[in-house]
Every structure is written in structure tokens, then in C-alpha cells.
Image (cartoon, rainbow, N blue to C red):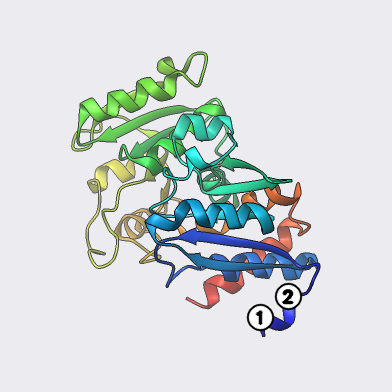
Amino acid sequence: MLDQRIGPGTQRFAVLGESLAHTWSPYIHNSLFAAAGRDAVYLPVTVPVEKLGSAVDVLRSCFGGFNVTIPYKERIIPLLDEVDDAVRACGAVNTVENRDGRLIGHITDGLGMLRAIEEGGVAAEKADVLILGGGGAARVAGYEFLARGGRVTFAVRNPDKGNTLADELAKTQADGRARICVCPLGDIPSAHDILINCTPVGMYPHADECPVEEDVVARCGAVFDAIYNPRQTRLLRIARSREIPCVEGLGMLFYQAVAAQCFWFGDTGVSSGVQNEIYGQLLAQL
């Protein structure tokens, strides 16, 4: 029982959101705490928009850290004391570290994506990456691959939006604009090491849709789909049918949580092998 796990010395962590009925975050974090032998607990905290400031004050006073999900990833930034370079580049926070009452914002979504890709046997360092979409997830992915010396092509429906995104990300890297291209989503001309889907195309209940034509998939060395409902999207099924290495989106959810705990504790206290075992246990429940 949860109440039996909470004592005077128990560290408290949370996920903060407006609707959390289907979140896997408590399962993931509490499993990692248990594996590390930590006296800690992770709770879902549902907060209406008008109470966000009050909720942050409470978390500041008695929680070791917390995660942030929709619709608060941008709205929480003015309530924090500090943010890191990734947040300044991406304009969103999903992890908050509490250092003696000082709240520091981080974004671990991109770190989780990279870890999932690498655990899938795909090299992410200095990769030539095709990113589908120009929203928040695409921005985070672009930032992380550029930071690792990669080249990024954004395939977007709105070229103006894509070029604005490219120009903004270019400011985060000394030679950033030289390593960023923008092309129409319906006209992708070249081959790439990794295709990253950051659009909602293919998400339940439209699981038979695919964001690009099959020939685009065939020109890529590996495929990652940020969608995890369904786990096997049409994009991934196409890649698999062509024997192209592919990575599902649920790994991003899991490994961004691992990265969050590194900000809270400095280290998860759990080996990579045990982390992967916990991830396997999560997959078995779906």
C-alpha cells in the first residue's frame, strides 16, 4: 500500500498536469526508486490551470523535484528560478529540480529519445537526421541531435514555420544553420541516417495513417516514431517490412524518466541492465 511506503524521511516527487488518468510516470519512477533502494515516492498531482502557481509553491516547499506535462510545460517557466540551456532553446520544461527551495527547469524528452534510439542499436552521434514535423517534439529532437554534431532536416507542412524553427535552433550552435535544412513534408528528396516522426500522424485512433510515403522510409537507415499509442505504428510496420531498424516511442517515455532522476539525484542508482529490465516489465503490461 502507498501509505505504508511514506514515512517522515520519505522523499516526495510528482508529475504535475491538468489530466493524469493514463500516466505511466508513477509506475516508472516508483519502480526505479524501489530498484535503487531509495526511500522515495512519486505521485500524480492533478492541478487546474488557475491553481498552478499555488501548486508550485507547495512542491517547492516539500517535494524533492517533479515532472511537468501538458498543458504546463511552457506555462511553468515563469514560476521557476532558473532554466538550463536546453530549456532556453526549446521553450519547454518537463523536469524540475528542487535545490533547497530553488527550482531549476530541465527538458529530458530529447535525452529520452536519444537513449531509446541508442538502446535500439542505432548510432545517434553525428547522425544525419530527418525530423518530420515542426512542433515542440521536433524542436527538442533537433536541439539534441545538433548538440551531438549531427545534421538535421525538418520536413514540415508550413515552410515559414520550419525556417523559423531552423533559425532559432541555429543560434544554439556555432555552425548550426549550416547543419540544418528545411523541406516540404510532401517532397523529401534525400536519404538520411535516421527518420524521426514527431507528428501525430499514425496515432490512435488513426493507426492506419503514415506521415510519409514508403519510398521516404526506404531511403533511411533507421526509424524512430515518437508515437506510442499504438506501439507499432504503420510507419514502424513499413520499416520492419523492409528490414530497417526501428524504435518505438515508449522507450522515449521511459528513458526521459531515467534522465529526470539523474537531475534529481545525480544518478539513478540503478544499472543500465536493471533499467532495461524495468522497461521490459513495463512493455509486458501493455
Quadrant, the N terminus:
bottom right
Q: Which mark is residue 2?
A: 1
Residue 257 visible, this orientation: no
Q: Position of residue 22 (x, y in %)?
A: 43, 71
Q: Position of residue 160 (x, y in %)?
A: 22, 25
Task: Judge from the rendering whether residue 220 lies leftward or rightward of residue 99; answer left or right.
Answer: left
Q: Helix or strand or loop: what does disc 1 sit on?
A: helix
Q: Residue at x 69, y 65 (%)?
A: 32
Distance, label 2 to label 1, CA atoms, is 7 Å
The part of the image, by quadrant, that contains residue 158 is top left
Q: Residue at x 59, y 68 (%)?
A: 43
Q: Residue at x 79, y 65 (%)?
A: 38
Q: Residue at x 36, y 20 (%)?
A: 167
Q: Nearer the viewer, residue 167 or 117?
A: 167
Task: Judge from the rendering whether residue 208 lies leftward or rightward of residue 37; answer left or right.
Answer: left
Three-letter amino acid code at the position of disc 1: Leu
Above or below for 149 versus 118: above
Bin the neighbour count of mark 2 within 10 Å (Cα to Cα): few under 14, some 14-19, many 20 and up.
Answer: some
Residue 178 visible, this orientation: yes
Q: Position of residue 186 (x, y in %)?
A: 18, 37
Bin the neighbour count of mark 1 within 10 Å (Cα to Cα): few under 14, some 14-19, many 20 and up.
Answer: few
Q: Helix or strand or loop: what does disc 2 sit on?
A: loop
Does the CB distance between marks 2 and 1 fall below 8 Å? yes
Above or below for 227 versus 182: below
Q: Nearer the viewer, residue 102 or 179?
A: 102
Q: Nearer the viewer, residue 241 or 117?
A: 117
Question: Circle 2 is placed at which residue position?
Answer: 6
Three-letter amino acid code at the position of disc 2: Ile
